[in-house]
Amino acid sequence: MSDTHAQTVPFVRDTMLPAAPPPTRESGAVKWLRENLFSGAVNTVLTILGILIIWFLVATFWDWFAHSVWNASSLTECRQIIAATWGENARGACFAVIRERWNQYVFGFYPQTLYWRPTMAFGLLMVALAPVLFSASLIIRRVVLAITTLATLLCMMVLGAPVGWLVFAALVLAGGLLASERNIAWLLPFSLIYPLLGVWFLWGGSLWGPIFVLVGPLLGWLAWRLLAGISPLLATVGAILVTVLFWLLLAGDAAQSAQAVLPLSIEAVRSDRFGGFLLSITIGVAGIALSLPLGIVLALARRSDMFLIKSLAVIFIEFIRGVPLITLLFVASLLLNYFLPPGTSFDIILRVIIMVTLFAAAYMAEVIRGGLAALPKGQYEAADALGLDYWKAQRLIVLPQALKISIPGIVSTFIGMFKDTTLVTFVGLYDPLKSMSDAVRANIEWKGIYWEPFIFVGAIFFLICFGMSRYSMYLERRLQRDHR
Amino acid sequence: MNEPINRQIDRSQMTISDEVAIDIRNMNKWYGSFHVLRDIDLTVHRGERIVIAGPSGSGKSTLIRCINRLEEHQAGHIVVDGVELSSDIKNIDKVRSEVGMVFQHFNLFPHLTVLENCTLAPIWVRKVPRKQAEATAMRFLEKVKIPEQADKYPGQLSGGQQQRVAIARSLCMQPRIMLFDEPTSALDPEMIKEVLDTMIELAEEGMTMICVTHEMGFAQAVANRVIFMDQGQIVEQNNPTDFFNNPKSERTKLFLSQILGH
């Protein structure tokens, strides 16, 4: 030490120190291992214990997987192959059931000659989703749409789609690719009409049905325009009333008359032919698409200053959340018909979709309410102070931020809802996990096979749900606006 | 605190007209049973620059937040630009689009860029075409001296820069009256000056301003009336020279000695 002391000698720095790199004593894998796995006696023991448990699990199941058979026409044949190849006492998985019953797991009892229709519907769904899900990144869009185009056309060809529809699908897919390169917003009109197209592709029948369903909201919009000058509330009520009345009273007859004049129809497929992943994905996609907007409306209603609206929202949310989904599904399948006017027959899948949507929307509303509550009051005040009215403030300022905060919760709800689609087994629909596997086992060839179908269906569910989870993380990163 | 105002203020443009911009009569407000504002009478003429001072909890912020109805008053009248504030939503929106407000915590929209923050209200409330709104926004961003930050997000700016963006955002609506609610209270000392300079420039252009602030140097340099509030009422109002050099009420003297005395 020198003789100088900080207390006695004034100090002035005349050169600033440059930034220096951190010391390079330890780095890389060794450092990571030491810090994370072997940082002390307890951690070392736990690490070794963990490795032993993993080893035990892998050792137990490895043989079973390694001995799996992918080519056989019955469980008995599977066992014979395993015994012949690996010895009398060897155990092995018989994934041949997946290979043999693949179509059944994917399409249910959908007519085999029409498999190309759900395939096309799924491919075009990706085009419709592109402007909503992948609007930000050209590269992601390009990859997703290119793979979709190739896969859809290839599958349609293999499944024997008519040339006319192949050309139609190719045109739409090419249009999607072109729009994605130029301006993805061009696809938004397609996204808007896709729900009707998709329903038509899946269920078939007359095109006039979906067209007149579309006419309802158009008439409603006209009514809104006419009444908007008088009172916004009256206009909204009028628009909803006109739409619903048109659907209930006129749409059916109009569609029939139009069909009589100009027949435009493809082969109809009844709802009880749906099954497997086609059913799960149909219910899941419809439920996701409908429950988010409904959840937003419910969340806003629950925070409303208007007593009646707030009470209705609270009652709805608390009732739906307080009841098991299966109860609602039973109501949909058994009781709903008693409450509807006689003669109206309501499609079972549509009824299930409505119930699943209401169920998910109640959870969604609470998740979004959390996001709304997390916004600082200053955001509302700033929007008010600039003169934005309630709906503009919600749309431009509040919801974009609240929804961003709620992304993890929203996607959680989606994932939960998608997995809950397997519960439709209780109302006699063929979900892939239970009903479809039971149907497979009902055959003498596959009687007694349990593990393999469950593992297969579980793996597909995992892939889809994990994909949603990763997408939500990507979205969160993309929407991050601070500290960049 | 030492006041950072040392520039020569040009008062030549700062003319006050006879036209009444804000007229508050007998206004009272309660939070539950707590009487926050008591019998407020205040007339502001066009071009006037008013500074409201007072201890915390005295109702200064509540008063200016009543002027654009972020807070509701329960008795009395508030007339802004000839429009009476009542529960009529059309009137409220009309007043709000004519009155700009700058907040203590900026309240910028973090999910929008600086430019989008500035163009949002003109496009959606005033129905200005986007191109034109962007041109106007750039003009005001240049005025507050941060045009180069237009494409950044608020979270990437310093506090002083954010507050200047907030001022520009209000100005883009071309308001006739500006309200400032402690605009420098959340800022580091080094950034206070840049915000005050912007406000002084605005004052020099003849903007009608009401500022709640503890910056007494700013009050001396810019205000033509200082209002002192305590316990929800106006205790004293005067021109800045007399207010600071010759306060009348004991409460004012005590307040001034406490904030200027060190």
Image: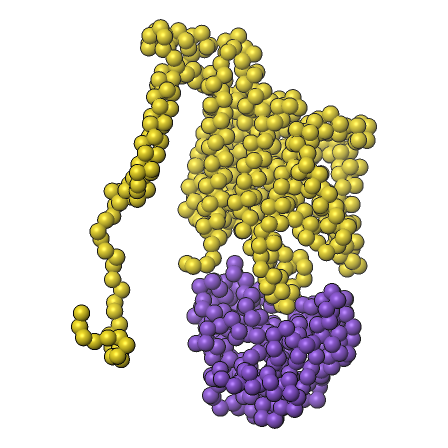
Chain colours: A yellow, B purple
Q: Residue at x 38, y 17 (%)?
A: A64
Quarter of image, res A398: bottom right
The correct choice, above or below, for A137 with respect to B127 in the image is: above
Q: Residue at x 75, y 54 (%)?
A: A306
Lateral position of residue B17 relative to residue B166, left or right: right
Residue nearest the observer in this picture, A483 or B251:
B251
Give residue B175's position: percent from left, percent from top: 62, 75
The correct choice, above or below, for A303 with respect to A250 in the image is: below
The correct choice, above or below, for B216 with respect to A451 in the image is: below
Give residue A190's position: percent from left, percent from top: 58, 43
Name the quarter where the N terminus of chain A is drawn. Answer: bottom left
Q: Residue at x 62, y 90 (%)?
A: B247
Name the quarter where the C terminus of chain A is drawn. Answer: bottom left
Q: Residue at x 54, y 15 (%)?
A: A440
Quarter of image, res B238: bottom right
Residue nearest the observer in this picture, B18 or B239:
B239
Res. A25 in view: yes
Lateral position of residue B89 relative to residue A115, left or right: right
Res. A354 in view: no
Lateral position of residue A212 relative to residue A73, left or right: right
Give the residue furthest to the left. A2
Residue nearest the observer in this picture, A210 or B173:
B173
Give residue A365's position: percent from left, percent from top: 64, 45
Give residue A22's position: percent from left, percent from top: 26, 57
Quarter of image, res A390: bottom right
| Count of numbered circles on the image | 0
